[in-house]
């Protein structure tokens, strides 16, 4: 049990029973991985959250939080709602993703978490009022919202796997 994050009966991702229906299933998996992101970063200091993986990569737990805030914003505000007036989070001058930050402190980390949580709350609202079979434009192709939700699950799952490796390098912690 020492390598587990939490005892099974205290895991906030535990569901009461199997999900029923497509929406409940998809949203349940998305919420599971959103919570997993938080669990994988829990208890790390600002310095640890900014710890990068193997050079030359700039991958870090904090970078992952910022990246997922940007992904939530992009898919739910910009694509599903079509709000191209919303400035992309962490956009650098060349149109890329500004991940490399010079100074990280508790306030910087708190702001990153606030942005992520705000975007997740907004995305939840958008998803609640949007049908899964609604069509949205993705680079000129009509795409169902369900495909975006599946992509979000995949995005979180992949990055939670990265966080497993990062966390193990930072403090040896492994587990669920």
Image (cartoon, helix red, strand yellow):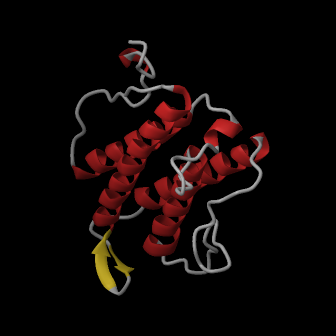
Which residue is painted at 70% across and 57% down in the image? 101
Residue 6, compared with residue 39, is above or below; it is: above
Residue 127 on image: x %, y %: 42, 59
Residue 20, compared with residue 72, is above or below; it is: above
Residue 163, compared with residue 94, is above or below; it is: above
Looking at the rendering, which quadrant does residue 42 occupy?
Answer: top right
Which residue is painted at 26% across and 45% down in the image? 25
Q: Quadrant of the C terminus?
A: top left
Frontmost residue, 132 versus 10:
10
Residue 87 horizontal side relative to residue 75, left or right: right
Q: Quadrant of the N terminus?
A: top left
Residue 11 on image: x %, y %: 42, 23
Q: Give the residue at the far top of this rendering.
A: 1
Which residue is painted at 62% across and 75% down in the image? 86
Residue 161 horizontal side relative to residue 19, left or right: right
Residue 143 on image: x %, y %: 29, 75
Residue 133 on image: x %, y %: 27, 68
Which residue is painted at 35% across and 87% down in the image? 140
């Amino acid at each position: 049990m020492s390598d587990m994050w939490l005892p099974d009966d205290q895991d906030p991702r535990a569901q009461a029973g199997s999900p029923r229906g497509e929406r409940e299933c998809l949203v349940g998996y998305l919420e599971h991985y959103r919570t997993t992101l938080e669990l994988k970063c829990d208890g790390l200091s600002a310095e640890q959250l900014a710890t990068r993986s193997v050079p030359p990569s700039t991958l870090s737990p904090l970078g992952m939080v910022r990246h997922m805030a940007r992904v939530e914003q992009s898919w739910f505000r910009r694509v599903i709602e079509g709000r191209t007036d919303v400035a992309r989070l962490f956009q650098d001058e060349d149109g890329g993703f500004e991940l490399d930050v010079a100074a990280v402190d508790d306030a910087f980390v708190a702001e990153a978490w606030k942005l992520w949580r705000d975007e997740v709350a907004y995305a939840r609202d958008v998803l609640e009022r949007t049908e899964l079979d609604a069509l949205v434009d993705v680079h000129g192709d009509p795409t169902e919202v369900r495909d975006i939700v599946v992509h979000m699950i995949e995005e979180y799952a992949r990055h939670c796997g990265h966080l497993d490796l990062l966390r193990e390098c930072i403090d040896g912690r492994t587990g669920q």
